[in-house]
């Protein structure tokens, strides 16, 4: 059974940085991409960033582009999200997701097959 475990969340002041990590285990098949989503209280879970393993293409939500960087190592089943210049509006639970289907997009929850439990990121003003 595939398990995704996030780590690295916490409390940080506005302007600060955090690095999230997500480790996948239990996978016996190839992964096509991994992504990060976030959900703030009272809001729907939304796309943050994704990386496609083949070719290394990356995708970002407009609200984080230029501040967040996604990276990873498919061989190590690990993906990272470096978050710089954090803002209070970045406060949310951040979820790691894995896409094993080799078709479809990268920006919607429905594109992903497995999810982690989430890690809280709180940015104080």
Image: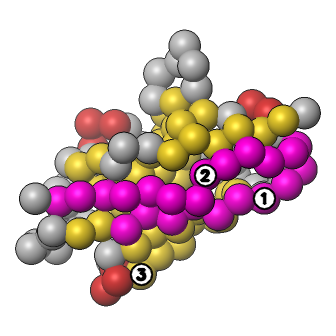
Q: Nearer the viewer, residue 24 or 74?
A: 24
Q: Identify the residue at horizontal 23%, vertical 49% (top origin).
A: 114
Q: Along the horizontal axis of the image, is 79 left or right of 91? A: left
Query: Mark 3: which secondary structure?
Result: strand
Q: How many marks?
A: 3
Q: Identify the residue at horizontal 51%, vertical 65% (top origin).
A: 21
Tell me the crowding category of disc 1: few under 14, some 14 to 19, or many 20 or more residues within 10 angstroms, Cα based.
some
Q: Which residue is mark 3?
A: 73
Q: CA distance from mark 3 to mark 1?
A: 21 Å
> Contact, CB < 8 Å: mark 2 with mark 1?
no
Q: Nearer the viewer, residue 91 or 103?
A: 91
| Res 17 label | 1
The boundaries of the magenta stretch are 2-23
Q: Which secondary structure dominates the residues rendered in magenta? A: strand
- For discs 2 and 1, the disc positioned in front in the rendered view: 2
Q: Earlier in the sequence, mark 2 or mark 1?
A: 2
| Res 9 label | 2
Q: Quadrant of the C terminus?
A: top right
Query: Mark 1: which secondary structure?
Result: loop
């Amino acid at each position: 059974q595939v398990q995704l475990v996030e780590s690295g969340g916490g409390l940080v002041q506005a302007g600060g940085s955090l690095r999230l990590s997500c480790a996948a285990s239990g996978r016996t098949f190839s992964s096509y991409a991994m992504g990060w989503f976030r959900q703030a209280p009272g809001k729907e879970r939304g796309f943050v960033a994704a990386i496609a393993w083949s070719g290394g293409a990356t995708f970002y939500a407009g609200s984080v582009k230029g501040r967040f960087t996604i990276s990873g190592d498919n061989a190590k089943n690990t993906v990272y999200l470096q978050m710089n210049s954090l803002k209070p509006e970045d406060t949310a639970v951040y979820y790691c997701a894995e896409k094993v289907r080799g078709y479809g997009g990268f920006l919607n929850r429905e594109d992903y097959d497995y999810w982690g439990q989430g890690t809280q990121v709180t940015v104080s003003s």
